[in-house]
Image (cartoon, rainbow, N blue to C red):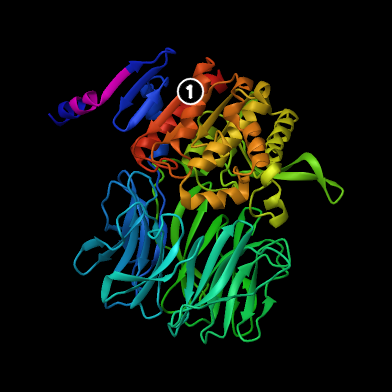
Amino acid sequence: MKKYLLLITITACFFVTYNSTGQTKKEIGNLVIENIPDIPHELRERLNQYQNTRGAAVSGWSPNGNAMLMFTRFGETSQIHLINMPGGARKQLTFFKEPVDGGYFCPNPVYNGFMFTKDIGGNEFSQLYWFDLSKGKYEMISDGGRTQNSNVLWSDNGTMFIYTSTRRNLKDYDLYLGNMNDIKNVKSILEKEGRWNPLDWSRDGEKVIVTNYISANKSVFYILDLSNGSLEQINPSAKEDISYGNSAWTSDAKGIYYISDEGGEFMTLKYYDVATKKSTNLTKEINWDIYDFIINKERNTIVFSVNENGAYKLYRMELATNEYEAISGLPAGLVYPDKFHPNGTMFSLQINSPKSPSDIYSFDLLTNKLTQWTYSEIGGLDNSKFVMPTLIEYETFDKVNGKTRKIPAFYYKPTNVNDKIPVVIEIHGGPEAQSLPYFSPFRSFLVNELGIAVIEPNVRGSSGFGKSYLKLDNGYNREESVQDIGKLLDWIASQPELDSSKIAVSGASYGGYMVLASLTHFNDRIRCGVDVVGISNFVTFLQNTEDYRKDLRRVEYGDERDPQMKEYLTKISPANNVGKITKPLLIVQGQNDPRVPASESEQMKNKMQEKGNDVWYLLAKDEGHGFRKKENWTFEQLATILFLQKYLLK
């Protein structure tokens, strides 16, 4: 009987129409599907195991250190769980249709709860909630409007909190102060133009380190005095733009530890003396980015992570001497330190690699013991057969210091293919992001089941390789990153095991733009493309992205209000170069996307269809910037595989 009723529900939500160009259009639940054939049953079955993997992410210790808040997915979306021992059962606390973020445990055990955030349908208007564990109830404490509320920072004693909100004008990120005794009655403590975030609260509760984020290349640190609202800039410099990372007070609030790229190519850990206003570089011997650091409550130990060409290594630093050493005994992979245990010597962390999903661990600095807390499922698959990538470098078109510049990339090569291997080039977004060797069951399916090589380049403009490299694609240099893809096509053609006649490009967000741009420049060398929430026209994108993002994106791409820049952006936009594209395209979009509005995909789809091109289109009405609900991303992956089977492999 239950099966019969389920079939009736699905049939009632299924509609098929035909538009003027002969494209089929179906609606199944919240999915709008254009020109995508029915998914074969055998493909669903084949992919099923890969889609039933899950990972775990840690969000912090309870005040007594007996449990951790964590995220994982057992249903449609990722929710908050509590785990109270290594290998213990995960107790689910939130049960929403929408994914949940945050998970900020109040450090004061009297209040016994945590903050979390949630939006609706991927619109990113995240609201802030308080979850009272004593009552098992939650309540919204933000305004509930079309605002963003996030980045909760607790005072040392856990009686006060600060968070960021755009409630004043829906554009600027202001800071609000709340008291746990009257949780909804918050007051504004910083109202300024731009993107502001709280970073660390002094132990005496009087001052807060705040940052004004301007771009990937520039941010500014300040000390906010809560008694009078005054701001004092930390480490002012008139010589250069400085990019800052994390920061933390010393125990006596006389100094600040922080990450910045001041005076060099890479992010380093520094110390700032508040009285003398002088900085000291503590890790100048490390010629890679310091990614992040955590500090214990006593403020006598720091653990920091270093991104060495996509491999993460952890170091410990004793603040009495500022001497540091590598932490041994950790498995290879992406290692992310999370928070110190209340005892000050143990910390939580996540470890992820192409062979294993993200899991939660603790590490004891006294005993050097690593303890695994979660054991995430991998759908019964044999993960020993998952391929580890090879880090390659290929030459591109320009020179640096008299030598031809090389672009780094991760190369996942199938082991069970005898013929020449087809290739998917996967391009990251950002554009300031970085391709990293993380766990991806979908990538593993392409490599292991379909025999496709996957190459993930870090083209110019990627982070992790120095600030000069990060700036190489800004403004009028935008298409030089596209030329890096052209040189990757040359490299593929030079490899005897790869089939240069069977290449697809795929990417999301800015990576989606790179897909479209690659098709306009290298149409004859690419079989097909997969564009996920991609930018198709920089001018309309900058005009229509949410107000809180406009200025940030103009720093990276250029200001479309300037006539000369507008002319350039119009010229290079793929939607204005559809005539150069003859190859099939799959476009995936969330209707509620606040970053790259759905109109970017719609205009690309319409122009491709008007030209008679073969374009598949998938729209989710309940998603935003990428699909986060299992039902939706399951169909997205199935459609992508079917698309690649038809246009890349055949």
Which residues are drawn in magenta?
A: 8-16
> What percent of the width, then of the height, locates residue 101?
38, 56
Identify which residue is drawn at 28% across, 71% down: 183
> What percent of the width, then of the height, locates residue 325?
64, 73
Q: Looking at the figure, which quarter contains the C terminus? A: top right
Q: Is residue 329 left or right of residue 374?
A: right
Query: Observer-nearest residue: 203 or 350?
Result: 203
Identify which residue is drawn at 49% across, 43% down: 440
Query: Observer-nearest residue: 554 or 510?
Result: 554
Question: Does the image show residue 432?
Answer: no
501, above or below 264, in the image: above
Count of picture labels: 1
Q: Is residue 126 magenta?
A: no
> What percent of the width, then of the height, locates residue 522?
68, 26
The part of the image, by quadrant, that contains residue 176 is: bottom left
Residue for badge 1: 606
343, above or below 363, in the image: below
- Label 1 sits on what residue type? Asn
562, above or below 110, in the image: above
Q: Is residue 313 left or right of residue 639?
A: right
Crowd class of label 1 (few under 14; some 14 to 19; many from 20; radius 10 Å) = some
> What percent of the width, then of the height, locates residue 165?
40, 61
The part of the image, by quadrant, that contains residue 88 is: bottom left
The residue most toward the left is 1
Identify which residue is drawn at 52% across, 47% down: 355
